[in-house]
Image (cartoon, rainbow, N blue to C red):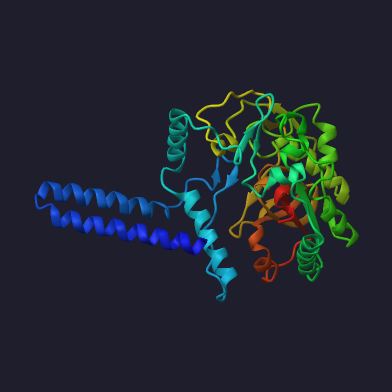
Amino acid sequence: MQLKRCYLFFQLQCFLKTCEILLFILISDMTKQRITIMLCAVLFCAALGVYAPLKSSVLETERRLASAFPELPHGISSGKIKKFCAGIDRFYADHFPLRSTILSAASVIFAYTGNHYDTSRCYQGKSNWLFLGNDYSKCVDKLTGKESLNENQIERMAAKYSRLQRLVDSGASQFLILIGPNKSTIYGEHLPGFIFPSRVRYISPLVAKLRAMNIDVYDPTERLMSFKSNRLLYYRTDTHWNLLGAYVAFEGLREYAKWPPLFPATFKNVPSKHGDLVNIGGYTSFHIIDDDTFSLNDFHIQSSPSQDDTITTVQASSDKAVWVFGDSFTEALKPFIQAQFRTVRYFKHDDFKKVMKSDAPRPDIVLWVVVERNFAE
């Protein structure tokens, strides 16, 4: 599929070049030639704009890091080529010029043409809550029990996490897995009436299997459920936990791992913004309620990054070093991770094998942060 996309993109480039040549042949007037040249220059610069560095590495409207250009595969195989092409797809999608403007324009087109929002991508629940749709790791089918893990899948995923642990153990580091529960798991009461969660959670058999193999897995679901009556722990219009939810989850992990206490943290409400689900669902506008966004109040932790992206916090609760391999659920955890550990380095999941086999001094702890919908993928 990825190679097909690359081939179609190549065909598009060839078509544009052919159009350019035909225009030069058909248009003899100098003024029209200049217009044609300017048009071609704009198209060329737009393509180059994909590779221009962004002002920020974070896509603010989606609360996640923009995808980096993938490294060239070591060796040639079908799987490596597909993975490389998939990385190019993600990079191109995140860095495309005027990306936000194009998404907004698409939303306007949806509104004026009368198309309904695709519930497979995003669906609306009760009380202005939005939830991620089934196109993303079949999360709705997993929630309702239409998808379940069979024995082969459990064994395959258990073998994957066992390999990760062995790589960590070879450097005498501690390996922990932190699951970021889906919003639909924590706030099932806000799901629409046609969504009925299964009594058996999709990931439960795999969690049980890993714990039986003495792999440390911390799932903060019960803790989040017990704290959610106080204040919201997830954004209404976003897939992620908010700063307070991340703190509640991290405190549970800290107690589970028996790490030293953090400095006291207090939170204050700040104005809410549209989350990633507004864009994913194609909404031109969505009513915002200012009760799901928080900032840290009087949490004065000074962290400083170095040239190798190591973040050092002198007044951290622990003098230990940690490497964090995570997804977008890591972002809100960062203030608390950096307050807990003297030195921190962040990586993406795909970096794990390369980093663990590098000559860099090993940390005391390796933390794997993964959202529930991708935990068994």
- Foreground of the two, 87 or 293: 87
Please state if 92 lies on the left or on the right of 142 as rendered.
left
Query: How far across and down, in percent of the image, does residue 227 sit?
Result: 82, 32
Residue at the location (54% across, 59% down)? 87
Tell me where residue 206 appears, x and y as whole percent. Answer: 82, 55
Judged from this view, the residue extending furthest toward the left is: 29
Looking at the image, residue 277 sits to the left or right of residue 50; the answer is: right
215 vs 184: above or below: below
Q: How many marks?
A: 0
- Give the quadrant of residue 356: bottom right
Q: Residue furthest bottom?
A: 75
Residue drawn at x 71%, y 48% is 373
Front residue of 232 and 124: 124
Q: Quadrant of residue 343?
A: bottom right
User: x, y (%) of residue 273?
Assistant: 58, 30
- Image height check: is 232 above or below 221? above
Q: Quadrant of the C terminus?
A: bottom right
> In the image, residue 213 lies at what x, y percent?
88, 62
